[in-house]
Amino acid sequence: MILDTVALVRLLEGTLDAGTVADLEAAETLAVGAVSFFEINQKVRIGKLGLPAFGPDRIAAIAARGIAVLSADGTVMARAAAMTWHHNGRDHRDPFDRIVAATALERGLPVVTSDAAFADLAAAGLVLRPI
């Protein structure tokens, strides 16, 4: 499973329900896209998120919890840019969501998310684990 940014934040804040946490702990693969650190740091920088920014120590702490950090290579980035993704009748242009979704599709991982927009990619093969 790959955590989207909101799922990562909720995991770190301890606000995920016990069933979700148990599912995450039992997952064969649990990962987060490196792009989520960029998204979090951007939101911290502009005052939209009250978490500490992610630097090398916090990223290492994530890895120490058994959460793999996945990079977005050229194939992922090209897929993110090219995918047709409409939500509520409009193009879903959030670059962070696009990169998380493309990473999940390229790696064959389900996405752990509370964002309803990801469900629009089910036809493209994206599997969701809603929270």
Image (tube, rainbow, N blue to C red):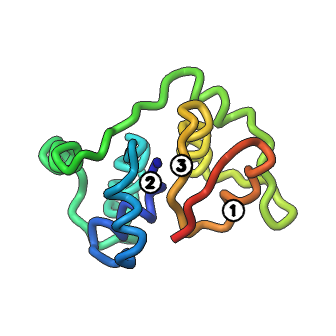
* Mark with earlier residue (2, 3): 2
Residue sitting farthest toward the right: 89
> Which amino acid lies under the numbered mark 3 shown in the image of this protein?
Phe
The residue mark sitting in front, 2 or 3, is 2
Q: Find residue 117 and name its label.
A: 1
The residue mark sitting in front, 1 or 3, is 1
Secondary element under disc 3, as helix, strand or loop, is helix
Q: Residues within 10 Å of mark 3 (few under 14, many from 20)?
A: some
Picture quadrant of residue 124: top right
> Which residue is at a point 54% across and 52% down the rendered structure image?
111
Q: Residues within 10 Å of mark 1 (few under 14, many from 20)?
A: some
> Which amino acid lies under the numbered mark 2 shown in the image of this protein?
Leu
- Cα distance in 3D space between marks 2 and 3: 12 Å
Residue 35 horizontal/vertical position (percent)? 43, 43
Q: Residue beneath label 2, please?
A: 3
Residue 51 horizontal/vertical position (percent)? 26, 68
Horizontal side of residue 85 vs 67, given as left or right:
right
Q: Residue beneath label 3, please?
A: 96
Horizontal side of residue 24 vs 92, given as left or right:
left
Residue 56 horizontal/vertical position (percent)? 17, 41
> Which residue is at a point 22% across and 43% down the rendered structure image?
63
* Mark with earlier residue (2, 1): 2
